[in-house]
Image (cartoon, rainbow, N blue to C red):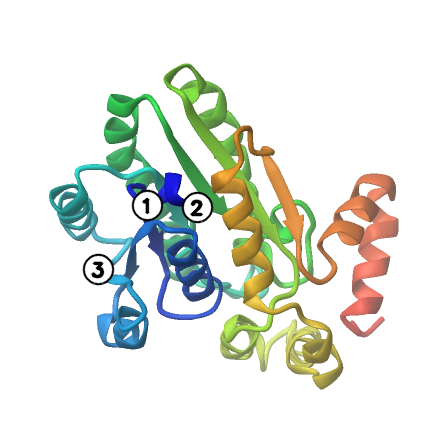
Amino acid sequence: MSTQTARTALVTGASSGIGEATALRLIGLGFTVYGAARRTDRLDRLAERGLRPLAMDVTDDDSMRGGVERVIAGTGRIDVLVNNAGYGSYGALEDVPLEEARRQFDVNVFGAVRLTQLVLPHMRARRSGTVVNVTSMGGRIHTPLGGWYHGTKFALEALSDCLRIEVRPFGIDVVVIEPGGIATEWSGIAADGLEKSSTGGAYAAQARAVAAAMRSESMAGRMSQPGVIADTIGRAVTARRPRTRYATGFGARPLIALRRLLPDRAFDALISRTMGLPR
């Protein structure tokens, strides 16, 4: 893909999982790729394969400004922004402290939006570019004890829709990627947070059931590999006219379809059974 050799991509959350796989995929497609993470030591192995490491905290404005300035100084352009950094904060809505809820929104929503704000002027100047927002099937469906997490993903979906219309006159595409179950460390981290916030209280039985489901070997065995998402992002950013949404990975398409077809309480019952919630 010689036509891609001059294009530059910035990928957040590049130190592991979907971000790492995406960075490597874009390098393979000929992009100059800057991989952003809070801990750049975790990017060392990727630097050996062509990644340009970038220290960035998406909750720190100075950090994001400095990162964008470094990319522009290095290549003069940002053609693709992949907003992938994020985590899952689980716990009963009543139990999760608002400080943690705000942090969840700061990382998953405001970090992505602020970085987009910083990148858009450079894309508009070239009248081209693609903003890729990695949401989740969790931006279209809901699961128990995931209210704050789902809230961030629903928000990012809506923001992406509005942004798509706003930037279209400038030749900029906005693409939403909706991963299903992916074999990363996400589930374990979410389960740990869930047990910390909602065990020992009124929601303890639900918390134990959901945490067990997140960690179950049967569930883990069905998860898709991060490369599935990376390949999808690669297709989206090289397409002449990318789709607005790509749902891919274990469970994404069928669960989103069921959410659209089933009444609310029927979907509630389905998800409750799937997660093994006590009745």
Write down the quadrant of residue 207 in the picture.
bottom right
**For residue 253, above or below residue 192:** above
Q: Residues within 10 Å of mark 2 (few under 14, many from 20)?
A: few
Say which element carries label 2. loop
**For residue 124, above or below residue 177:** above
**Direction bottom: furthest residue:** 217
User: Sequence-wise, which precedes: disc 3 or disc 1?
Assistant: 1
Q: Position of residue 250 (x, y in %)?
A: 71, 63
Q: Is residue 230 visible?
A: yes
Q: Residue at 14% of width from left, 43% of height from top?
A: 69
**For residue 38, above or below residue 205:** above
**Direction top: furthest residue:** 169
Cα–Cα span, label 2 and label 3: 25 Å
Q: Residue at 43% of width from left, 52% of height from top?
A: 29
Say which element carries label 1. loop
Horizontal side of 11 relative to 92 (left or right) equals left
**Direction front: furthest residue:** 2
Q: Which residue is mark 2?
A: 1
Cα–Cα span, label 3 and label 1: 20 Å
Label of residue 5 in the image: 1
Q: Residue type at mark 2?
A: Met
Q: Residue at 21% of width from left, 60% of height from top?
A: 54
Contact check, label 3 and label 1, Cβ < 8 Å: no
Of 133 and 5, nearer the camera is 5
Q: Is residue 155 visible?
A: no
